[in-house]
Amino acid sequence: MEWKTKITKVEPNHLVTKGYRQEDLIGNVPYSHVVYLLLKDKLPSKEHGKMIDAILTACIDHGVTPPTAMASRVVASGGVPLPTAVAAGVLSIGDAHGGAIEKGAKFLQEGIARMKQDGKSIDEMAKILVSESREQKKRILGFGHRVHTADPRTKRLFSLADELKITGKHMNLSKAIEKELGEQTGKNLPINVDGAIAAISSDMGFDWRLGKAFFLLGRVAGLTAHVYEEQTQEKPMRKIFSVDCDYDGPNERDLP
Amino acid sequence: MEWKTKITKVEPNHLVTKGYRQEDLIGNVPYSHVVYLLLKDKLPSKEHGKMIDAILTACIDHGVTPPTAMASRVVASGGVPLPTAVAAGVLSIGDAHGGAIEKGAKFLQEGIARMKQDGKSIDEMAKILVSESREQKKRILGFGHRVHTADPRTKRLFSLADELKITGKHMNLSKAIEKELGEQTGKNLPINVDGAIAAISSDMGFDWRLGKAFFLLGRVAGLTAHVYEEQTQEKPMRKIFSVDCDYDGPNERDLP
Amino acid sequence: MEWKTKITKVEPNHLVTKGYRQEDLIGNVPYSHVVYLLLKDKLPSKEHGKMIDAILTACIDHGVTPPTAMASRVVASGGVPLPTAVAAGVLSIGDAHGGAIEKGAKFLQEGIARMKQDGKSIDEMAKILVSESREQKKRILGFGHRVHTADPRTKRLFSLADELKITGKHMNLSKAIEKELGEQTGKNLPINVDGAIAAISSDMGFDWRLGKAFFLLGRVAGLTAHVYEEQTQEKPMRKIFSVDCDYDGPNERDLP
Amino acid sequence: MEWKTKITKVEPNHLVTKGYRQEDLIGNVPYSHVVYLLLKDKLPSKEHGKMIDAILTACIDHGVTPPTAMASRVVASGGVPLPTAVAAGVLSIGDAHGGAIEKGAKFLQEGIARMKQDGKSIDEMAKILVSESREQKKRILGFGHRVHTADPRTKRLFSLADELKITGKHMNLSKAIEKELGEQTGKNLPINVDGAIAAISSDMGFDWRLGKAFFLLGRVAGLTAHVYEEQTQEKPMRKIFSVDCDYDGPNERDLP
């Protein structure tokens, strides 16, 4: 029943996280680099440090309508402590919200592995993957956005990844898929911010299982701001939204 | 039914958070400074930027035993998605866990307001506050720790606050209370990490209602690492801990 | 480090809850009576059994707009497991949503204690309590509803409590407060469903600290139905509501 | 953007759930039957009513060690409201904890569909399913328990299902699988309580997607009792368990 952790050693007056004394990390290593350390067991290079920081900032907030923000605001309106309301927003991060990072990264990482195994080029692999997904009527995640056609976050992440020389085979496969999708479907389905983070984090060597973590770790800042704003600027149990929902259940009836 | 938000303006291909375009923030302003922006409506000075970053790092992790980490690991062991398990840890941030930052900051902020109103010195105010709390048998929060007598995080935060010239009246009141507590109780009850963050964030001008937010925003990094470690290194539903709990309810009986 | 529990004794092939073997409870004691057993350490009388069952049913659902239902539906739309989405709704049960049961019961239980101590009649006590709350500009919780003027649940709970001879001093104090509120404010503020449960559960001898528990234990049924409906009838990340929210934060600006 | 709900119609002074006025349901229809109504759109027969009630009671509690109870107690110890702590326990209901009901019911429902399509007998189908799962090295869920060899809840549910004439093809397939597992593996892997609920709820016509719902709706009673006990009998932030966890991360080192 013994178990091991690689995260933190706790002794009286002594805290060591992933090998580094916490007093050495505090104020010397930027918080976003400490996040990297926690998830990758080593401090980032200068380039990776700048990139992980940019990824977190790219996830901070998208206004009041996404499930994350709305869940946090609605729960806050019930009159609960700040962490309870922030956690409610975190709960909504799922396969359909933020989940494209995880699934997209898995798709790219498996695509690259298969490409190597089968001796294909990136363009060949993209063609195969897009064709297969169309045959199986499965959407490839990380392309297209319900609000933005040219997401400003995506463009910035791309140019940073290039500048920092992080762009690698996962990003190139992602761009080849974008092109192939356009050709095969005739639609413009640009890589979205989830898809960009999926590709870049894969090129940085992160496990796709951490896909939702990047979104969560950035978004929690915006959620905290939403809950604080709700708690200090609005009345409890206020009407937050209007709903156009009709009852179409069984007709009113007497008990048998 | 109209309402307002000061957080993010969302338009197609255009995202503005607290006045700044997100593409300008990404990769140009450190993530921890963006957190400050979200909570304070302006970018930090160089000194405040370094301090908020240090505060977040000071909260990242304290091993597997605090309610935050244990709740996240236990929930992860049920076989749920990463965000669900991280959120469970966030839920445990309450009056008894991380709550000393909020309550401590409120106590200090009200103490300073009262000091000004009553024309007292910091030492006089500390004496009054400690005497009152002893009469009312109320603990002053932010002093003493169940593991550390000289918490390495606290020492580092103090020296940074001095170095960055952030130390001000709230920290001074806190130190005067620590001294007074020692004199009145005969016990050594040093300012703990929660108390340090309470004092420093107050000197930075933060609302005490954000007390739990700093802890949450830092700790979420450690919780993510715990959940990832549990999901990738351990078996679902494993025995995580041993419990020494006896049943002392009603004796076994037949239904009436 | 030893601790005790009065809830369940677990031995191989043997489970005893509050003194009763689980195999005896299953199918012999109605589930709602088992809830009573868990919270009160004994099985209910016939009358109390019928009343606790009615209280749970009175809390099941109030459509899609309360924070509970909306939080569950919004979180479900993120594409998460059913329990995660149900839990999100439970999180919104707070001081402003369902909280009137807890606070109302506390108010009534303290009112009755004070009435006895001060040798007052119920009408005298009601007058004192309403006057005090008006002087302190504090709302007495459990009166008035934002949708219903004659809540059908409340009327049914009242007549059941009378019929089952559960109506006692807490309910009488509640009715005296309702009358006094009308006289002192000139407004019609009828006891609402929260107030009814506060009074009845107090007359049944329940601790006010369980106030939110009744609401939670009933509402979880409706929340499960909402999440199941969302997951099986709607698309992930659909637009659930419309929001009329304007950005009034800092004007768009360049980084300094 | 219009949507529909079959759950509750809300009008001033008028609440209709699945066709029935709430005032008619309250105190006339047992709460557990109302749960059935919410999940199945109709009131249960006498037999189904008794069975759904028994299923909920079979899930109430299994002491302090399962992830549900431990998550709720640990989170409660952080000093948070009762619903927040109960919700934390609900979050741990996942593929590895309570999830066998969902997966087991899906397996049985698909097995019966395939049996009909392929014109097999129940025994033939069981043989095929066990052989396939052994070839694919996949565990069939709902068999074996880490504490009980003859779970008292399971036996009681079986005899009730027989008595109420609910036992049908899903339960028979389940029993045939149990027998076949014994023969093919030489191990005694009796249907456990999750497996029993999977089979019985399938014979009652419930969608396997509701598998986790039964467990959740019953367990929430025990979780409420655990949180209440923790909040009223124990000190905040107490040491709840002992952990035997070693740090085996990177050796202590200086920052580069």
Image (tube, coloured by chain):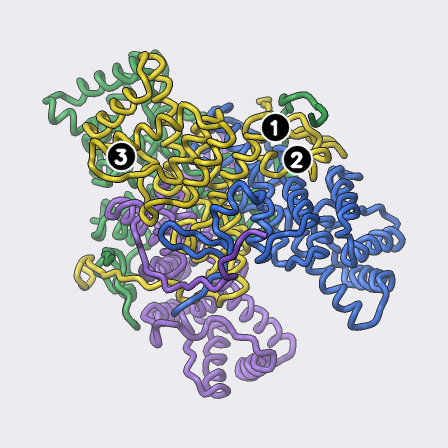
Chain colours: A blue, B yellow, C green, D purple
- Residue type pointed to by label 3: Arg
Kindly indicate whether the residue at mark 1 contacts the one at mark 2 (C-beta within 8 angstroms).
yes
Kindly indicate whether the residue at mark 2 contacts the one at mark 3 (C-beta within 8 angstroms).
no
Expressed as whole percent of the image width and height from the top left, the position of residue D49 reads 39, 57
Earlier in the chain: of badge 2 and badge 1, it is 2
Earlier in the chain: of badge 3 and badge 2, it is 2
Relative horizontal placement of residue C75, taking residue C1 as reference (left or right):
right
For mark 2, give the secondary structure: loop
Tell me the residue at 19%/20% (across/down).
C125
Relative horizontal placement of residue A234, taking residue D226 as reference (left or right):
right
Q: Which residue is mark 3?
A: B139
| Viewer can see residue C147 | no
Q: Which residue is mark 2?
A: B29
| Viewer can see residue C72 | yes
Q: Chain of mark 3?
A: B
- Residue type pointed to by label 2: Val
For mark 3, give the secondary structure: loop
Expressed as whole percent of the image width and height from the top left, the position of residue C47 reads 23, 45
Dot 1 crowding, Cα within 10 Å, few <14, some 14–19, many 20+? many
